[in-house]
């Protein structure tokens, strides 16, 4: 697209204050079409003649800004009058906020020092056929807005009494326009709205509003006030053991809203930031707070819900709900680790762990394709993939199971949706990652002597460490094998000659087996079986089952082992044990957090410990989706909905449920590119009834028997 706009900014840096830019014009001629093309360095909200344009929250979204910056296009014809005023407020957003919170770096310094910028064109077509473009340039004006402070971690301050005056011509400046790309992902929107459940006074005497559900978004307040009265709100995820407000785990993120009221009845919400929260602490509120004063806007990318899982057990249903909420709370333009503390980054490992479940729960094809383009854009010259994408930790080392997102995510997106384009597009990046490992290992055919996150948060971690005891070289080499295997499969799909990689893969498997003849931890067993590296898969799976029994029917796994543990067990005949882990309620388990009142998935199995106290403030998010990856086992194994790799996108379906009589019934459905697949089993006295619906031919596995059926609805007995 050709643009005539120039980048503009305030003449003087306004510090924390969000600048507002405006363009006024009058037209005597009849207009047939008016479009606004717009983007910003920061996050913007635009209004035409006082009316908000579009419903994109935090536009232009988050990409690897140095290389890719999305612009948006809005039809503003209906908003035009004879006299017009376009105003655009630009907050710091991801572009200028001091991210991440816990670390100083050159890159962060550079980002903090950048100036807010605007780039826009109003494209007018008149009834007489003539055209006009009002593009950002020196004719646009700039002033301080009522947003006195706005930042991703610290929140927003808005002075409703502030009158924007002192307009000055904006200053043109040079910034690359070749980086501009049309909107790629779904836009971020207010997707849901929640009313508070209660308002109460805590033992510490605080006034707290409870929404009953942890969400990502912001609060909207409606109140009647005198000009100058103040509202001050803090956000929190949990109450402490005494029932008082707690947000120590937000670390340096202030997550604070400050609002200075105008006179009379008013409604306001922050517009240029977001929070992860369930509770609000009202530090200042000008009147007796009532439920009707608050509304929580749930904000996430406009992804379509495609999956559903339900069963006869209420606790599991709560877990499933928590998984969906975890996804909503962390699919805000990029897949983030968490939405609340001074982090909120696109951690590659977390995304890789969760992508499969995510792709059944919601249609995330577009969402991931956008993020993967950023991953490729930020891939380092030697092929290394950073820890987070967009890469806000450029000094951070690459890690196995994190960087592998470069290969695992595109492959999964292809598998779930069947569209080869993602492979064509990502293949060079996938290949670069595998080549990077080949070039950077100490020992050929393995990945040794790297620095990794290991089995992050593994329960078998030595005290004081976040890393489980599984050997890092083991994990890294296993993922090297897995990524190479997936790369070969991807290459074959798009017609590449993969002979060199096939040879490499054989070398890796051979060397892995020689170097790691035995497995020491649950996670090591899991990876060896899941990635097909163990020589005798059945035997290793049996040994894993024994080890789990010996460990007291408890997981010892972290980020790396947990997503596959149930798959490995049920695939090799240990379904009952898989269910025992799933249904376990004591720590550590998925249902432990449910018993402790979780409404999203926790970063630690014991974010709240057995005695009610918190895991250290240092790292204790209550909205981290990674362990929600268990949902893919529910879809694929428990309900049994899957497809063979040769039938990506569910063009043919396999339905092979694995029921367990500890549940009365379980059902799942996935809306695929070919229609909705459903599977429900119910335990009855005379057997287990299976009801399925398939929009395409399916192979149904009923215990030992296999049946092929055409599209349709069927009932079977197992
Ligand atoms: C993040 C994780 C991430 C990890 C990497 C944490 O601070 O929240 O989810 O994957 O660091 O070790």
Image (cartoon, rainbow, N blue to C red):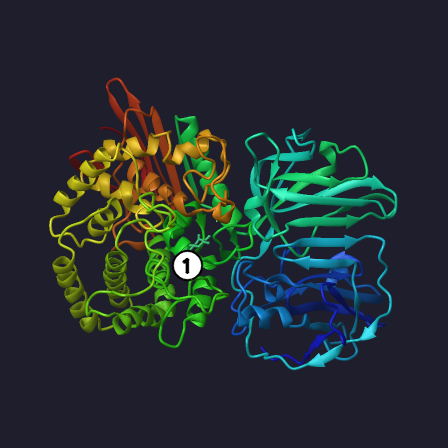
The one nearer the camera, 293 or 14, is: 14
Q: Quadrant of ligand 1?
A: bottom left
Question: Tag 1, which secondary structure?
Answer: helix
Q: Quadrant of the N terminus?
A: bottom right
Residue at 59% in and 70% down: 109
The residue positioned farthest toward the front in the image shown: 463
Against 445, residue 337 (above or below) is above
In which quadrant of the rendered view does residue 635 lie?
A: top left
Q: Is residue 226 left or right of residue 446?
A: right
Q: Taking the image as drawn, is residue 371 in sight?
A: yes
Residue assigned mark 1? 348
Label 1: few (<14), some or many (≥20) within 10 Å? many
Against 637, residue 128 (above or below) is below
Q: Is residue 68 left or right of residue 554?
A: right
Q: Taking the image as drawn, is residue 53 in sight?
A: no
Count of numbered labels shown in the rendering = 1
**Residue 2 position within the rendered picture, expressed as x and y whole percent measured from the top left:** 60, 80
Q: Quadrant of the C terminus?
A: top left
**Residue 139 position within the rendered picture, expressed as x and y whole percent measured from the top left:** 79, 78
**Residue 122 position within the rendered picture, expressed as x and y whole percent measured from the top left:** 71, 71
The one nearer the camera, 197 or 152, is: 152
Cβ of mark 1 under 8 Å from ligand 1: the answer is yes
Against 429, residue 289 (above or below) is above
The one nearer the camera, 55 or 196, is: 196
**Residue 16 position within the rendered picture, expressed as x and y whole percent measured from the top left:** 71, 63
In which quadrant of the rendered view does residue 202 lie?
A: top right
């Amino acid at each position: 697209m050709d643009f005539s706009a120039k980048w503009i900014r305030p003449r003087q840096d306004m510090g924390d204050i969000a600048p507002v830019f405006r363009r006024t014009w009058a037209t005597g001629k009849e207009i047939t079409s008016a479009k606004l093309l717009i983007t910003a360095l920061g996050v913007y909200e635009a209004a035409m003649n006082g009316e908000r344009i579009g419903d994109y929250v935090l536009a232009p979204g988050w990409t690897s800004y140095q290389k890719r910056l999305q612009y948006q296009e809005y039809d503003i014809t209906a908003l035009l009058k004879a006299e017009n005023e376009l105003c655009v407020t630009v907050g710091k957003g991801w572009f200028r906020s001091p991210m991440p919170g816990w670390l100083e770096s050159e890159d962060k310094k550079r980002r903090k020092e950048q100036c807010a910028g605007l780039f826009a064109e109003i494209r007018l077509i008149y009834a007489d056929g003539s055209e006009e473009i009002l593009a950002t340039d020196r004719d646009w004006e700039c002033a301080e807005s009522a947003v006195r402070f706005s930042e991703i971690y610290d929140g927003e301050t808005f002075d409703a009494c502030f009158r924007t005056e002192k307009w000055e011509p904006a200053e043109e400046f040079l910034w690359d326009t070749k980086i501009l790309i049309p909107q790629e992902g779904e836009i971020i929107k207010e997707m849901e709205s929640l009313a508070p459940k209660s308002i109460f006074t805590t033992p510490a005497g605080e006034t707290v509003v409870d929404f009953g559900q942890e969400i990502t978004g912001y609060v909207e307040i409606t109140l009647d006030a005198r000009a100058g009265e103040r509202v001050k709100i803090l956000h929190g995820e949990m109450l402490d053991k005494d029932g008082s407000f707690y947000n120590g785990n937000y670390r340096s993120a202030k997550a604070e809203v400050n609002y200075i009221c105008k006179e009379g009845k008013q409604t306001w919400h922050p517009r240029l930031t977001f929070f992860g929260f369930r509770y609000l602490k009202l530090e200042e509120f000008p009147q007796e707070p009532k439920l009707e004063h608050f509304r929580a806007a749930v904000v996430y990318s406009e992804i379509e819900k495609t999956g559903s899982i339900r069963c006869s057990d209420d606790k599991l249903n709560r877990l499933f709900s928590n998984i969906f909420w975890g996804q909503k709370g962390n699919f805000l333009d990029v897949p983030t680790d968490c939405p609340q503390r001074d982090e909120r980054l696109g951690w590659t490992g977390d995304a890789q762990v969760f992508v499969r479940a995510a792709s059944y729960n919601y249609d995330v094809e577009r969402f991931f394709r956008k993020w993967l383009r950023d991953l490729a854009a930020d891939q380092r010259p030697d092929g290394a993939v950073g820890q987070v994408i967009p890469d806000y930790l450029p000094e951070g080392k690459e890690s196995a199971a994190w960087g592998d997102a470069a290969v695992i995510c595109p492959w999964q997106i292809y598998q779930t949706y069947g569209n080869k384009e993602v492979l064509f597009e990502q293949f060079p990046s996938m290949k670069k990652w595998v080549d990077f490992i080949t070039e950077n290992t100490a020992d050929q055919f393995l990945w040794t002597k790297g620095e990794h996150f290991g089995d992050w948060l593994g329960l078998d971690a030595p005290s004081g460490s976040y890393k489980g005891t599984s050997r890092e070289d083991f994990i890294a080499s296993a993922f090297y094998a897995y990524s190479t295997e997936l790369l070969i499969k991807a290459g074959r799909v798009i017609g590449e000659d993969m002979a060199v990689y096939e040879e490499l893969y054989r070398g890796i498997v051979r060397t892995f087996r020689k170097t790691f003849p035995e497995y020491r931890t649950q996670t090591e067993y899991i990876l060896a079986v899941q990635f097909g590296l163990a020589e005798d898969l059945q035997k290793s799976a049996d040994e894993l089952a024994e080890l789990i029994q010996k460990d007291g029917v408890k997981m010892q796994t972290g980020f790396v082992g947990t997503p596959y543990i149930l798959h490995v067990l049920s695939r090799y005949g240990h379904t009952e044990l898989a269910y025992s882990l799933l249904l376990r309620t004591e720590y550590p388990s998925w249902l432990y957090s449910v018993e402790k009142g979780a409404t999203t998935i926790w970063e630690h199995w014991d974010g709240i410990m057995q005695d009610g106290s918190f895991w250290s403030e240092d790292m204790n998010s209550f909205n981290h989706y990674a362990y929600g990856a268990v949902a893919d086992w529910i879809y694929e194994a428990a309900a049994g909905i899957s497809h063979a790799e040769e039938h990506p996108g569910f063009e043919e379906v396999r339905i092979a449920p694995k029921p367990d009589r500890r549940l009365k019934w379980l059902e799942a459905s996935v809306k695929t590119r070919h229609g909705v697949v459903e599977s429900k089993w119910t335990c009855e006295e005379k057997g287990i009834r299976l009801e399925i619906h398939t929009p395409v031919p399916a192979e149904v596995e009923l215990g030992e028997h296999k049946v092929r059926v055409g599209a349709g609805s069927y009932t079977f007995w197992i």
